Amino acid sequence: MGYQVAIVGATGAVGTEMIKMLEQSQLPVDGIRLLSSSRSAGKVLTFKGQEVVVEETTEQSFEGIDIALFSAGGSTSAKFAPHAVKAGAVVVDNTSYYRQHDQVPLVVPEVNAHALDNHQGIIACPNCSTIQMMIALEPIRQKWGLERIIVSTYQAVSGAGAQAIEETKNQLRQVLFEGKNPTDLTADILPCGGDKRHYPIAFNALPQIDVFTDNDYTYEEMKMTKETKKIMADDTIKVSATCVRIPVLSGHSESVYLETKEVADIAAVKQAIADFPGAILEDDPSQQIYPQAIKAVGKRETFVGRIRKDLDIANGIHLWVVSDNLLKGAAWNSIQIAESLHERGLVRPSQDLIF
Amino acid sequence: MGYQVAIVGATGAVGTEMIKMLEQSQLPVDGIRLLSSSRSAGKVLTFKGQEVVVEETTEQSFEGIDIALFSAGGSTSAKFAPHAVKAGAVVVDNTSYYRQHDQVPLVVPEVNAHALDNHQGIIACPNCSTIQMMIALEPIRQKWGLERIIVSTYQAVSGAGAQAIEETKNQLRQVLFEGKNPTDLTADILPCGGDKRHYPIAFNALPQIDVFTDNDYTYEEMKMTKETKKIMADDTIKVSATCVRIPVLSGHSESVYLETKEVADIAAVKQAIADFPGAILEDDPSQQIYPQAIKAVGKRETFVGRIRKDLDIANGIHLWVVSDNLLKGAAWNSIQIAESLHERGLVRPSQDLIF
């Protein structure tokens, strides 16, 4: 009665969290197939106490699969997701490849699970930095409307994968134990694997995540702009982002300024956030209570605090949003999408669909 | 023909940088007196190759002193600065104690050296996070006017003193070598020495610098608001800040959004910043050139990059500002004030002054 589930990219930073989240999920799972590149094939992982040998992803990997969770980079999704759909699976894709496709719902279940209803076989999971901002802002949008957003992020290195975590730790060790100057460190991964130059992240803040686009914003920044509009189904919301990597292993933080359409009472905003599924209000300046990256690690919720009026603008509000970028920002949101598909009866063979 | 200079707080993180900056300054110095608390008195430091024994600060410490540089906390300035003025010295105070005093000029020399002209014996050096923002924004204000500023900071631990640097390193060592979980670390200093609770900074981002005020902004955030208005001599500029400590040893970074009064051309904004004294333009996305904290350490300039138009607001501009918080943010700006006083003939015994 349960599903056959495949995880593509099972050995990566997000993939390993997907396995854990799936183990804890209420989704009925009868069998699991763990897929990877040829390099990682043959590794043995466990799912609910059973050993599972990781297999190389091929066009034939998806026979008999009901749900395929992809998190192995955009090119892997581009190559294999259509084969998964043709084999009868529903794809939940955690890469950016399909996010802006007209026929692909981009879903944060607490915000727009209804967008799943007419899916064509592929559903996209938004970017980590967008997801947590949506959880913080949707309760505000529902009650007072959203006019604009200005966000500056404080993003963890795990967002760039397991190799970026190792690079960060190695650099810190070289400074703390070999006495190296941070400017003398070498870097191979950050700010982003696909770009020409690499810079040390140890004791640094790098205002570049993903490569630059033509308008001098990075792709990461443009993801926050475009994905917000799509998830909230409102092209008129103004969003400009500055995305910054800092030497934190996991847990993204965001300093968000927003303007509502109608002036909101701050106590009511706090209550709306506290009442919203997936959001936890952590906001008491008198007790120094506010969200912190290290405390969010391992949690599925999004934590919101430092909520206060702008000093001059009546409809302006500032807040601080923190979540585990590998969980709500990726693995957990993907599993939640699968759960929502199940609850809505939308895990079905893809007949006459576009992919 | 030179001056007798005293440095109060000479053994601290800023004080030791003040000694270095004074050694490299063109200010004519005939003698130096290094002052501290009783705890650090007796230490031996060097100035221009000469050994100097640090003395305890007393009311009599300023006899014969022409320029007294204070950086030992607000209470020390409150207690001793008036004695220094009475003894005939001009005080350059790097604490927040006198910054909002009506009769105390608050000076970033490149921006408002003219405010020194009617000093009453005490000049205040602004907060580190304000100073570097002023260097980046004054060239814009001069040409297009400034309507509002929204700033999110990425501040280094050295801003909280030498003990905060040690605390950060120790915490990182415990995680990297003893395998401790960051949430199990103990903390005694950060987010700020004077508050009730302390949190780990290793692999974390703490949205609190200084204690909270009644409006749920921190004092650090309110410093940025109030000091900007005073330095730019314009109470109508709207400024709201979110100040955040990150695990960087030195070098503050800032994500600044601003709206000009008149719409500005981005190329002209870049040129204005490049032309401004103390500012260095580092802005070429095609070559991944932008300011970085680790590269700013040891430099006196303020580095500005990621300059781009807001995606929706015609007069909105985003930029990234980095500077060494101990140098331009404190020690170097204080020495520059002393140099400006000298150049303007304003180092003089304080007769009939209010302090």
Image (cartoon, coloured by chain):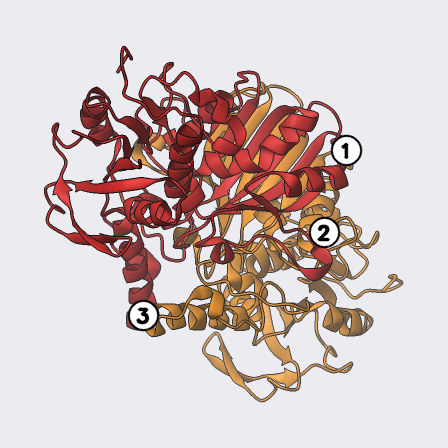
Chain colours: A red, B orange
Q: Amino acid at mark 2?
A: Leu
Inspect the image, locate mark 3, and give the three-letter code of the amino acid beneath it: Gly
The residue pinned by badge 2 equals B106
Is label 3 on the same chain as label 2?
Answer: no
Helix, strand or loop for disc 1: loop
The mark nearer the N terminus, 1 or 2, is 2
Mark drawn on residue A179: 3
Confirm whether residue B346 shows in the render. Answer: no
Locate residue B270 relative to residue B340 in the image: left or right. left
Q: Residue at x 34, y 49 (%)?
A: A23
Looking at the image, how many numbered discs can be counted on the residues? 3
Can residue B250 be seen in this snapshot? yes
What residue is pinned by disc 1?
A: B236
Q: Quadrant of residue A33?
A: top left
Q: Quadrant of residue B58?
A: bottom right
Q: Position of residue B288 (x, y in %)?
A: 33, 36
Mark 1 residue type: Thr
Q: Nearer the viewer, residue A300 or B252?
A: A300
Asked if residue B28 is positioned above or below residue A7 in the image, the reply reads below
Specify the subunit that label 1 lies on: B
The answer to the question of whether label 3 and label 2 lie on touching residues, with beta carbons closer than 8 A, is no
* Residue found at the very far front of the displayed protein: A1
- Label 3, residues with CA under 10 Å away: few <14, some 14-19, many ≥20: few
Q: What's the CA distance linking mark 3 and mark 2?
A: 38 Å
Q: Nearer the viewer, mark 1 or mark 2?
A: 1
Q: On what subunit does the disc labeled 3 rest?
A: A
The foreground one among B130 and B142 is B130
Secondary structure under badge 3? loop
At x 40%, y 70%, the residue is B180
